[in-house]
Amino acid sequence: MSDAAVPDLTQGLAAADLVDGVALVGHVGDEQVLLVRRGTEVFALGAQCTHYHGPLVEGLVVDGTVRCPWHHACFDLRTGEALRAPAFDPIACWSVERRDGRIFVREKRQQPTPRPRGRPTRPAPDRIVIIGGGAAGFAAAEMLRREQFAGSIVILSDDAAPPVDRPNLSKDFLAGTASEDWLPLRPDSWYPQNDIDLRLQTNVAAIDPSACEVALAGGARIAYDRLLLATGAAPVRLSIPGADQPHVRTLRSLADCRAIIERAQVARRAVVIGASFIGLEVAASLRARGVDVHVVAPEKRPMERILGPQIGDLVRSLHALGGRRTSGPDRGAQHARAARDISGSAIFLEPALRYPNQLCWSRRELGRACGRGRRCRKELPGALQAQSARPRRRIDLPRSRKPRGRGGLGAGGLVTCRRRARTKQIF
């Protein structure tokens, strides 16, 4: 939309031009502002999602919220508060005046303090332990504090870095167009300021549901009243000869990404095994660094199983324009190309194909990455589970026929957190 087509909302807009439930974008000074009418009320808010700056004018207005079209972050129309991850920061709000059949946007309002959106149905727990230091675990802890939960929160993470914006590890940061300062979901000081005990490089060895305790690898034990499992998933590791060599990388953590970037600075070519979202993002990012990239996958077209053949052909053509080469089964063939072994200078495929390489990563296909972990059942009092649309890293929990300990939660003691800790009220 050209600047001339974007109305100056300080000069007023005819009320008849604003349709109920249909967002309109204008500007106030140098800032884009979203204007939304719901019934007799009119709201003026920031026009971009605070996650990846998605255009909210293209999103959905549902009840008293607007939802980002890119990753489904959700914002309150009245307060601008981010109600659902992956956005955590609010969008700005402006005062609105209606006069003589026109709508005027005035000064920017001060951001209100978030208020709890529910009434506790039972006494609040004293301590909530979260296993997993990714986006889901962070989002749950952040929302608990925002909802005025005053008890103890402990996050146990086996990573060396605090929670980061993990999608950037295969996108802008890997491509070299974003600095490492972009990655942390919150600065290190945020955790002690919000009385959150973040324990990095901490491995959980076992969970004792009868005693409501988590056993750590070093022998320490941590008691909990509620337990949230937010472990995420692990990358696929190829079980073929040569896959354990130091130049064969997987991508999950910030340390993984740093190691790939270091090698990409001197490498001339790379092979990426897997042509789903993560693999193709890695391929595009490495091409941005001038590395010659081959993408190898058993499918005939990238992401054909998920998005269909037409989109698969489009994705393949876009990557070809960007200089990424893909390899799948030949047309009409009854076999797929699968990696069979990796030497120091080449990757060998089935059938007898050979690709030279200096970098090689096994794919991070979350849907195939792990066996489904045992679900938290009613025999595990106080246990919760972060759940996405894809399987999670397996974590084995002992089962108890006769529950003991400090009471269950809701229906069978299970609350799921879908898509980065979209939580129900848990206290």
Image (cartoon, rainbow, N blue to C red):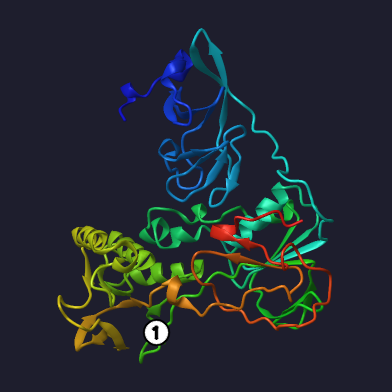
Q: Height in image: 109 above or below 246?
A: above
Q: Residue 96: percent from the left, percent from the top?
A: 56, 20
Q: Residue 255: percent from the left, percent from the top?
A: 50, 70
* Type of amino acid under label 1: Leu
Residue 126, picture quadrant: bottom right
Q: Residue 6: percent from the left, percent from the top?
A: 37, 24
* Residue occupying the far top of the picture: 100
Q: Height in image: 340 above or below 1?
A: below
Q: Is residue 251 left or right of residue 329?
A: right
Q: Is residue 364 left or right of residue 1?
A: right
Q: Residue 396: percent from the left, percent from the top?
A: 63, 82
Q: Height in image: 181 above or below 355?
A: above
For the question of whether residue 61 can be seen, the reply is yes
Front in this rendered view, residue 8 or 334? 334
Placement of the N terminus among the 4 image quadrants: top left
Q: Is residue 379 left or right of residue 49?
A: right
Query: Badge 1 is on which residue?
Result: 238
Tell me what residue is drawn at x 57 percent, y 79 percent: 394
Front in this rendered view, residue 165 or 71? 71
Q: Is residue 212 left or right of residue 35?
A: right
Tell me what residue is drawn at x 51 percent, y 16 percent: 104
* Residue occupying the far bottom of the picture: 241
Placement of the C terminus among the 4 image quadrants: bottom right
Tell me what residue is drawn at x 84 percent, y 70 percent: 406
For the question of whether residue 133 can be seen, the reply is no
Q: Height in image: 139 above or below 249?
A: above
Front in this rendered view, residue 231 or 342? 231
Tell me what residue is drawn at x 72 percent, y 47 percent: 147
Secondary structure under tag 1 reads loop
Residue 362, picture quadrant: bottom left
Classify 10 Å Cα crowding around label 1: few (below 14), some (14-19), many (20 and above).
some
